[in-house]
Image (cartoon, rainbow, N blue to C red):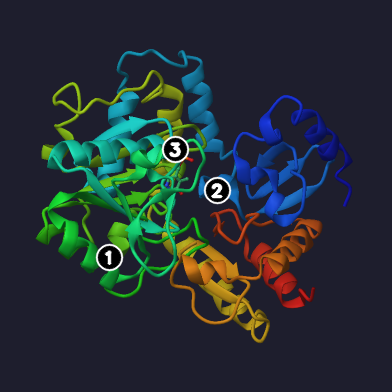
Amino acid sequence: MERTKSKMAYEEAINYIPGGVNSPVRALKAVGETPLFVDHAVGNKIYDIDGNVYTDYCLSWGVFLLGHAHPMVNKAVLSAVKRGTSYGIPSLQETELAKLVRSCFPSMQRVRFVNSGTEATMSAIRLARGYTGRNYIVKFEGNYHGHADHLLVSAGSGVARLGKSSSAGVPDSFVSQTIVVPYNDEKALEQVFQKKGKEIAAIIVEPVAANMGVVLPKEGFLQFLRDITRKYQSLLIFDEVITGFRLSVGGAQKLFGIEPDLTAVGKIVGGGFPAAAFGGKSDIMQMLAPDGPVYQAGTLSGNPVAMSAGIATLTELMKPGFYEELNTKVDAFERKIKKAIEGKGIVLSRIGPMFTLFFKEGKVENFSDVKQTDQERFARFFRYMLNHGIYVSPSQFEGNFISIKHTQKDLDRFVRLVRDFNE
Ligand SMILES: *Cc1c(COP(=O)(O)O)cnc(C)c1O
């Protein structure tokens, strides 16, 4: 498979754009490749500028549950564009999408639209701090909530400790009120709350972690978060930017039956446009400007084109049987792939239409487990799949996604390639 034009395009891009990309993982450094440049994408296929076709298991990081360029979404977008692309004045589409979001996520009694998942979690945290009058937040190691300063925090494995930023350019003081705890570790969390509980504004969590590869919450873990935050009158924030509308129409909170105080959604809700949202109980949301003292704003927030894409997307996936069809397909895929990886030193971690193949033996319950994966072998796997026309997410620390457009035939081919992988 030739990628000459992509290689040339990359050589040119790096003269103008740092690293040639506008988001770091796209550079494919972790897998020893250079990026593809996409010409167009339809359904579950992406077409690069060299004329190669790939079945897409990254789907713009989980955005395209309906597949790329869905006809109903495109129709809605084109009609919106003709009526002007931004007003800075309210439009009916904003209320319409807010209604749809709330009907899927009843815990989001009020919804504020923003432009990215980063903004949604950043604003939810500011709101939680404003509402509780407390400063500390708790996050989990390996959970990603976008790139706001105080959330770019990692921590050593095993012990909970005050965060140190994982990025240069973030003063230690900015992250001094972010406490990092290993995912799925109730004991560590209990200790943190015993010490600091009355100063903790909120726990923010990916209810199913999907930014260290897909890592499931242990049985009872989410309920434990709900209980301990109630006990200490802290808020529970679910970052459902990936899981929202993907694990079920009502995200992870519906699937696991846990009601958080605040929720962030993104990716799918924007239908392929830069839109995300946060929302929650109305008495908390009332603290936001203009009703309350917590400031939050955006020139393009609630953008009519993005709202129209979101409305069309949610309308499609709210149709009866949508998730049944999707999950039946993926259940069969799971059974087959489990067989294909037997004895290969690979662990499958899957929930609904998202999964990671971890190149290691044994359990994967937290970030330390993920760090034990064989990165070199994964890189070979990525290149092998790419050369067979399959684009998987280019890192062990990312999930793969399946859309309604992936056919049984596509999935069977994926399984066969995994079975035959021998490098
Ligand atoms: C993608 C993601 C974000 C950040 O969203 P952006 O739109 O990239 O800013 C936040 N949280 C989670 C769980 C995500 O997967």
The amino acid beneath tag 3 is Val
Residue 187 locus on image (x, y percent): 26, 73
Residue behind mark 3: 170
Residue behind mark 2: 61
Residue behind mark 1: 222
Query: In the rendered image, is residue 95 in sight?
Result: yes
Residue 85 locus on image (x, y percent): 47, 16
Residue count near mark 1 (Cα–Cα under 10 Å), binned few <14, some 14–19, many ≥20: many
Q: What residue is rendered at 88% in x and 41% in y?
A: 4
- Left or right, residue 336 beside residue 227: right
Q: Nearer the viewer, mark 1 or mark 2?
A: 1
Q: CA distance from mark 2 to mark 3?
A: 26 Å
Residue 404 locus on image (x, y percent): 54, 55
Earlier residue among tags 1 and 2: 2
Residue 58 locus on image (x, y percent): 60, 52
Earlier residue among tags 2 and 3: 2
